[in-house]
Image: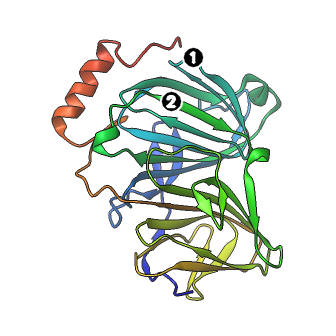
Amino acid sequence: MKHNSIKKIGKSDFVNMGPIKLRQPIPTQEIEMIDPFVLLHHYGPYPINELNNPFDLGPHPHRGFEPVTFLIQGEQLHRDSLGNESVVKAGDVQWTTAGRGIMHAEAPTKEFVKRGGNLEGIQLWLNLPAEKKMIPAAYQHEKNEDFKVVTSDDGSIKVQVIAGELNGTYGRIATQTPVNAFMIHASEGGTMELPIAKEHQSLVYLLKGSVTINKEATLSFNNDQMVWFAQDGEGFSIDAQTDSQLLFLSGVPHHEKVTSWGPYVMNTQTEIMEALRDFQQGKMGYLPS
């Protein structure tokens, strides 16, 4: 396999989001976006208890993209203006298609806050192309135990296929555009080669541990944590120095202008103003606090 060359290696520095401090590998001063991925937040692990719960996010709107949550640790309650209410547990994925507009709220469940524990996850903003920005909103919640798994030949690396396809195994999440999302669990000493579709932009983000990518770039927690690949090969290799967890993302880029403001990702400033107006007029639905 001809490996994709490494376009850029990225850190995952902390940023402040209100009372929450989290890691933000995308966007940064060096990496504005990796089309079609607009934003990647790695939050936690936060120690949640009755005296410390900064992650109670009340009702808020979105339009024009797909906010996706990969929950690593803990337990969150999701509610939205479509009438969905679900408890998202460790390893689960919630994939919201905001489309023309949705209101949602998320917070650690009351039971989780009462017993206490760590909350950790990834929030990804996946852009929708202009032709799909105003489609009806939708919500998918898939449980950890239901994802199909592809295992390396020696059994040392297991890849959960969340969306898209890997070696003939398909993810359970239905996507609006061609996208792959894999959660990779590697044991110390594990090695594996994974393909990348030529038309896809792609990245791999380290959640924990230490790995070498393509025998040349070492990722380790609290250091370099992300690799952005060029579109010039057939895939990449992983060699795990320690037990590690990584998120792989790839998708066909839209090559469109992106204008974002707060919870909206559109193509023009006029569309942002329209989103603000529609939210104020209640056109994105209602959700009690």
Q: Residue at x 78, y 81 (%)?
A: 189
Up/down of 197 relative to 110, above or below: below
Instruction: Name the image quarter holding residue 174.
Output: top right
Q: Is residue 21 left or right of residue 38?
A: right
Percent of width and height locating residue 108: 67, 30
Q: Is residue 146 left or right of residue 213?
A: right
Indicate which label's residue lies in the foreground, 1 or 2: 2
Q: Residue at x 45, y 28 (%)?
A: 137
Q: Residue at x 50, y 30 (%)?
A: 138
Amino acid type at image mark 2: Ala
Crowding around mark 1 (Cα neighbors within 10 Å: few <14, some 14 to 19, many 20+) is: few
Up/down of 202 relative to 49, above or below: below
For the question of whether residue 121 can be seen, the reply is: yes
The one nearer the camera, 6 or 255, is: 255
Percent of width and height locating residue 255: 27, 58
For the question of whether residue 260 can be seen, the reply is: no
Q: Which residue is mark 1?
A: 83
Q: Is residue 44 left or right of residue 234?
A: right
Up/down of 258 relative to 270, above or below: below
Q: Which residue is mark 2?
A: 138
Crowding around mark 2 (Cα neighbors within 10 Å: few <14, some 14 to 19, many 20+) is: some
